[in-house]
Amino acid sequence: KHSFNFMIKLYQKRKYLKEVITNDGTITLKNDKYNECYHSTEGAVTETLYKHIYPAFSVVDKKEIKILDICFGLGYNFL
């Protein structure tokens, strides 16, 4: 939540940043100056599932696993 508030404050200060609703309904920011989004346009939830959760379950033969988030980046991949 803290990271998102930081991004909103940054967004409000920069006229070339705009909010974009991603395919899974989460929000990212698009930099119109560089025509780039800060996160996947598929969405934070979808990105987290495909980059972290599904691969973790594919290598472990258990119904439940524990995932340690060691706080790299902005924290948008944390579920």
Image (tube, rainbow, N blue to C red):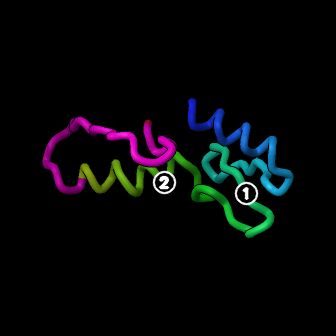
Residue 49: x and y, percent?
42, 50
Q: Kindly report which numbered mark, 2 or 1, lies closer to the viewer in this rendering.
A: 1
Q: Taking 43 as reference, is 5 above or below it?
A: above
Q: Residue at x 57, y 37 (%)?
A: 3
Instruction: Tell me the tag on residue 41.
Output: none
Give the residue type that dot 2 points to.
Answer: Glu
Residue 28: x and y, percent?
66, 49
Q: Judging from the image, what secondary structure is the residue with disc 2 in?
A: helix
Q: Residue at x 57, y 30 (%)?
A: 2
Instruction: Tell me the tag on residue 30.
Output: 1
Q: Taking 66 as reference, is 72 above or below it?
A: below
State yes or no: discs 2 and 1 in contact (Cβ < 8 Å): no
Residue identified by numbered label 2 = 47
Q: Which residues are magenta?
A: 58-78
Q: Is residue 27 left or right of residue 45?
A: right
Q: Which quadrant is home to the N terminus?
A: top right
Q: Which quadrant is home to the C terminus?
A: top left
Give the residue type that dot 1 points to.
Answer: Lys
Helix, strand or loop for the magenta stretch, by majority:
loop
Q: Judging from the image, what secondary structure is the residue with disc 1 in?
A: strand
Q: Is residue 62 magenta?
A: yes
Q: Residue at x 61, y 48 (%)?
A: 24
Q: Earlier in the sequence, mark 2 or mark 1?
A: 1
Q: Residue at x 48, y 41 (%)?
A: 75
Residue 38: x and y, percent?
62, 57
C-alpha distance separating marks 2 and 1? 17 Å
Mark 2 nearby-residue class (10 Å; few <14, some 14–19, many ≥20): some
